[in-house]
Image (cartoon, rainbow, N blue to C red):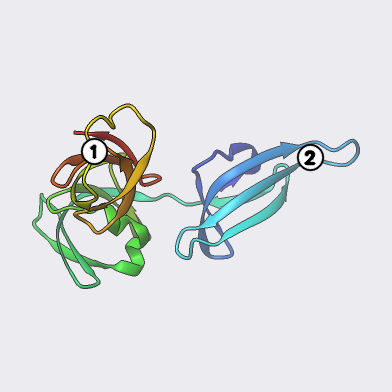
Amino acid sequence: MITTADFRNGMNIVLNKQLFNIVWFQHHKPGKGGAIVRVKLKNIKTGQILERTFRAGEKVEDARLESKKKTFLYATRDEYNFMDMETYEQFVLTKEQLKDKVNFLIENMEVSVLWYNGEVIGIELPITVDLKVVYTEPGLKGNTASSTTKPATLETELVIQVPLFVNIDDVVRVDTRNGEYLQRV
C-alpha cells in the first residue's frame, strides 16, 4: 500500500480492482480544511481517462508490473507472435491487446512485455523505430530546406507526415510515443 504522498507520474495503482496509470497529479491545500490530491488516471486495459480526488494521506494499492524482454516474430491477421529468447517459448497477443502499438512492430524487434498477476497487459516499444517508406509522392529537387510535409505510408501501413525530400524506399526514424517523423536514416 502507498499513500497519496508517494504518487508520481507514470506510477501504476489498483483502484476498484482495476489497473490504472497516473497521468497527472497535483497536491492542493485549500484555505481551510485538509489537503487533497487531484489525479488524472488512465485505465490500462480500456484506455479510459478518469479524474479522481483523494484526501491527503489516503492509502491505495500499488501495482507492481513485471517486464520481460521478448522478440516479435511475425503477424497473422489480428494475431502477433512473440518469443522468449531464453526459453524459446512462444505466445500470441491480439490486436486489441496491443492497440496502436501494432503500427510500429517489425519482425525481430525486441520489446518489453508487461505482466500483472500472470496476465499480459501490453508491451513497451523502443522510443524510436526505423521504418521503410513504401509509398509517398515523389520529392522535388530543391525542397530540402522548407518545412512543408507530405503523407508517407510506411512498411507497417502507418501513415505519417514527412518532409518533401523523403522518397520511396528511404528509411525514416519514427518516435513511437507520438508517431512523428524524426529524421531520415
Q: Residue 39 or 33: which is nearer the viewer? A: 39
Q: Residue 169 or 80: which is nearer the viewer? A: 169
Q: Secondary structure beneath disc 2? A: loop
What residue sits 16% from the left and 41% below the top? 170
Q: Secondary structure beneath disc 1? A: loop
Residue at the front extreme, as displayed? 141
Q: Amino acid at mark 2?
A: Ala
What residue sits 22% from the left and 33% below the top? 141
Tell me, yes or no, if residue 138 can be seen here: yes
What residue sits 39% from the left and 50% below the top? 65
Q: CA distance from mark 1 to mark 2?
A: 60 Å
What residue sits 53% from the left and 40% below the top? 9
Residue at the bottom extreme, as displayed? 77
For the C terminus, give its image quadrant.
top left
Q: Reply above or below: 79 against 181.
A: below
Task: Indicate which disc residue 43 carries.
Answer: none
Tell me, yes or no, if residue 119 can be seen here: no
Q: Residue 97 or 76: which is nearer the viewer? A: 76
Residue identified by numbered label 2: 35
Task: Give the left or right position of residue 148, taking residue 38 as reference.
Answer: left
Q: Reply above or below: 69 against 147.
A: below
Task: Give neighbour class at mark 1: few <14, some 14-19, many 20+ (Cα, 10 Å).
Answer: few
Task: Give the left or right position of residue 150, taking residue 52 as reference.
Answer: left
> Where residue 18 appears, x then y in whole percent?
52, 63
> Where residue 93 appears, x then y in whole percent?
26, 66
Q: Residue 61 or 137: which is nearer the viewer? A: 137
> Where residue 166 appears, x then y in whole percent?
23, 39
Choose mark 1 or mark 2, whichever is in front: 1
Residue identified by numbered label 1: 140
> Where residue 36 appears, x then y in whole percent?
76, 43
Residue at the right extreme, as displayed? 32
Label whose residue precedes the other's in the sequence (1 or 2): 2
